[in-house]
Image (spheres, rainbow, N blue to C red):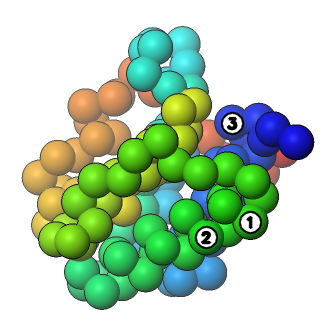
Amino acid sequence: MTLSAKEMVDIAHRAADDKKATDIRVLDISNISIICDYFLICTGRSSTQVQAVAEHIEEKLQEAGVKPMRIEGFREGSWILLDYGDVVIHVFQEMERDIYNLERLWGDAQVVEMTDIL
């Protein structure tokens, strides 16, 4: 069974919440970019928490039959990127999230409320 992008975002959002990630945001960039359909962006308080959030998201998506195309930044734990093709997940420490400010960079994207996703 292949998951839809919306299903992947839902699983990833729940997994991030399980590990107490904060400020979890989903951006629908499908109408403004060919990179992917959704960004999920969240924050952890430390490199350890950022790594734990990323690992849990990867684990939950793998249980659903989806493996990442690539993972970047895991060792440093300040910004971990999990690329699932149609869904790209960014797990930041607070300072890095403020610096890169993807929500501003992708300001034309629609912010998705999780109640709207499924």
Please, what secondary structure does the residue beneath circle 2 have? Answer: helix
Mark yes or no: residue 34 visible: yes
Whole-percent x, y for residue 53 in the image: 46, 75
The residue carrying mark 1 is 63
User: Which residue: 55% across, 64% down?
Assistant: 58
Query: In this orientation, which residue lies closer to the viewer: 67 or 33?
Result: 67
Q: Nearer the viewer, mark 3 or mark 2?
A: 2
Whole-percent x, y for residue 110 in the image: 53, 29
State which tag comes first along the sequence, 3 or 1: 3
Left or right, 93 with reference to 66: left
User: Which residue: 31% across, 60% down?
Assistant: 80
* Mark 2 vs 1: CB contact within 8 A: yes
Whole-percent x, y for residue 116 in the image: 77, 42
Please, what secondary structure does the residue beneath circle 3 have? Answer: helix
The residue carrying mark 3 is 5
Please give the label number shown on residue 59: 2
Q: Tell me how far mark 2 sits from mark 1, CA to CA.
A: 6 Å
Left or right, 72 with reference to 99: right
Query: In this orientation, which residue lies closer to the viewer: 96 or 58?
Result: 58
- Name the kind of residue labelled 2 in the image: Glu
Whole-percent x, y for residue 5 in the image: 69, 36
Disc 1 residue crowd, few under 14, some 14–19, many 20+, Cα 10 Å: few
